[in-house]
Amino acid sequence: MRGSSATFVRNPDYWENDPLHPGNRLPYLDGLNAIIIEDASTKLAALRTGKIERLFVTGEDAKSLMQTNPELKVRKLMPAVTDVISMQIQQKPFSDIRVRQAMQLGINYREMVDDYYEGDAEVVSWPVTRSVGSDIWLELDEMPSETQELFSYNPERARQLLAEAGYPNGFKTEITAVSWYVDTVSIVKEYWAAIGIDMEINVTEVGAYVQLMLSHTYKDLCASFGYGCTDPYTLWAAYRSDSVYSYSGVNDLYFDETYADILATLNVDERNQKLRDLRIYLLDQVDYIPLPASHTYIFWQPWLKGYSGEYASGRSYGNEGIYKYAWLDQELKRAR
């Protein structure tokens, strides 16, 4: 498949040495091959048989690997990327906030966490995750009651809001998704059917899907993911009117002005309070419908050394800080 892998070659002129071993020039690896494997079972088999060195896994697959391959190294991470449903909020019916609120109220978040994710997920991790730290993070029960209500399951109120918005019988809609979102959006489809929203799932291949997201040309809805949830300054590109990552096409003057004010605020405590307040404001607008965020497990081979389960390094999910220190214990790999 075209574009199924990316190969990186060591730069012999790279300037940095290992700070713990100053005589060693980085990076240690001669090269790196990043492989794109869409099928979940194929990915797991590749890790089990030593064909790949590292893999991100969630849910049942993580439990399975722990049972069948105890030799693998593993680290559990807090959610770093939150799945969301983006929508064409400049178009009807999604331009009406009552419709957006109804859609969110029609999802049983707690049931999804308890049943689908078997408790291994968090109800709300948007537009930042708890990994931003206690200076910015607020638990759901620390937020205003109006914000908390949006994450409650209230189909009666949802139907009422739809009627008030002019959709007493609901409406038909379509969501664009790639294969790995099908299970999640299928659950949402069932929830929304109960409040009168008939959603068709349009599964497309990855290349076309990315193009539709970045160009904001998908029809109605799109199952997508939030970038940079560990860093509010990166993630909130999802709301900037000038950002290609604003998949819902948000054009909110209050956000743009408030965000600019936050960037200009030098007092740390004052800035953090503004970030907390802005997070609540964004949740209340429902420009995106966040879905429960599952915990991620990183598995890696015991012969991958100089690595401790890091997801990424730096503010923008850079991986250069990980791979330049990694090396392979070839003797250990051959003895497998």
Image: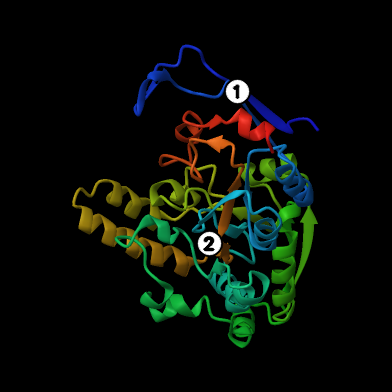
* In the rendered image, the vertical position of residue 278 relative to residue 325, given as above or below: below
Amino acid residing under circle 2: Asp
Which residue is the site of mark 2? 287
What residue occupies the far bottom of the structure in this picture? 156
The front one of 310 and 216 is 310
Q: Residue at x 35, y 58 (%)?
A: 133
Residue 25 location in percent, x, y?
43, 18
Q: Which residue is drawn at 20% across and 48% down?
A: 266
Which residue is the site of mark 1? 31
The front one of 313 and 90 is 313
Evaluate whether residue 89 shows in this view: no
Amino acid residing under circle 1: Gly
| Count of all numbered marks drawn on residues in the image | 2
* In the rendered image, the vertical position of residue 193 relative to residue 125, given as above or below: below
Mark 1 lies on a secondary structure that is strand
The quarter of the image holding the C terminus is top right
Residue 58 location in percent, x, y?
63, 58
* In the rendered image, the vertical position of residue 139 relative to residue 78, given as above or below: below
Callout 1 environment at 10 Å: few (<14), some (14 to 19), or many (20+)?
Answer: few
